[in-house]
Amino acid sequence: MINLETISPIIIAITLWTIPWKGYALWKAARKKHMIWFIVLLLISTAALLEIAYIFYFSDKKIRFNSNKVKKKTSKTHE
């Protein structure tokens, strides 16, 4: 049988550990306008593992959605 007296302190400890990391990661994602990361961090609870990975690794990476660059054609005028 599950002992509620031992589970409750564990849940409280995990919650107290997660809240500051989640808050900082959400703040950083919002400031950098990383909408997809903001939504993922908001909806998924990973005991701060995803939040820490975002803060220290993914937030400083440049996000590319399309690797093909569009080149402008420049017209040269003949004199």
Image (cartoon, rainbow, N blue to C red):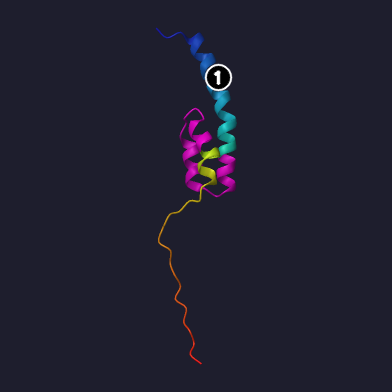
Asked if residue 13 is positioned above or below residue 64 in the image, the reply reads: above
Give the x, y percent position of residue 5.
51, 9
Range of magenta residues: 26-53
Is 54 situated above or below 74? above
Check residue 76 for magenta coloring: no
| Nearer-the-camera pick, 75 or 5 | 75
Looking at the rendered structure, the number of numbered marks drawn on it comes to 1
Q: Please provide percent x and percent y for residue 28.
A: 58, 42
**In-image side of 14 versus 65 (left or right):** right
| x and y, in percent, of residue 75 in the image | 46, 82
Q: Place residue 68 in its image quadrant.
A: bottom left
50 is higher (above) or lower (below) than 70: above
Please name the residue that numbered disc 1 is placed on: 12
Name the image quarter holding residue 22. top right
- Main secondary-structure element of the magenta-colored stretch: helix
Residue in the picture at 60% in, 31% down? 20
Depth check: give the residue in front, 62 or 41. 62
Check disc 1 and give the amino acid type: Ile
Q: Is residue 13 above or below residue 18?
A: above
Residue nearest the observer in this picture, 44 or 72: 72
Q: Which quarter of the rendered picture does the N terminus lie within?
A: top left
Q: Report whether 16 appears left or right of 50.
A: right
Instruction: Pick the residue in front: 71 or 12.
Output: 71
SS for callout 1 = helix
Magenta-drawn stretch contains 28:
yes
- For the point 50% across and 36% down, the residue is 53
Residue occupying the point 47% across, 31% down? 45
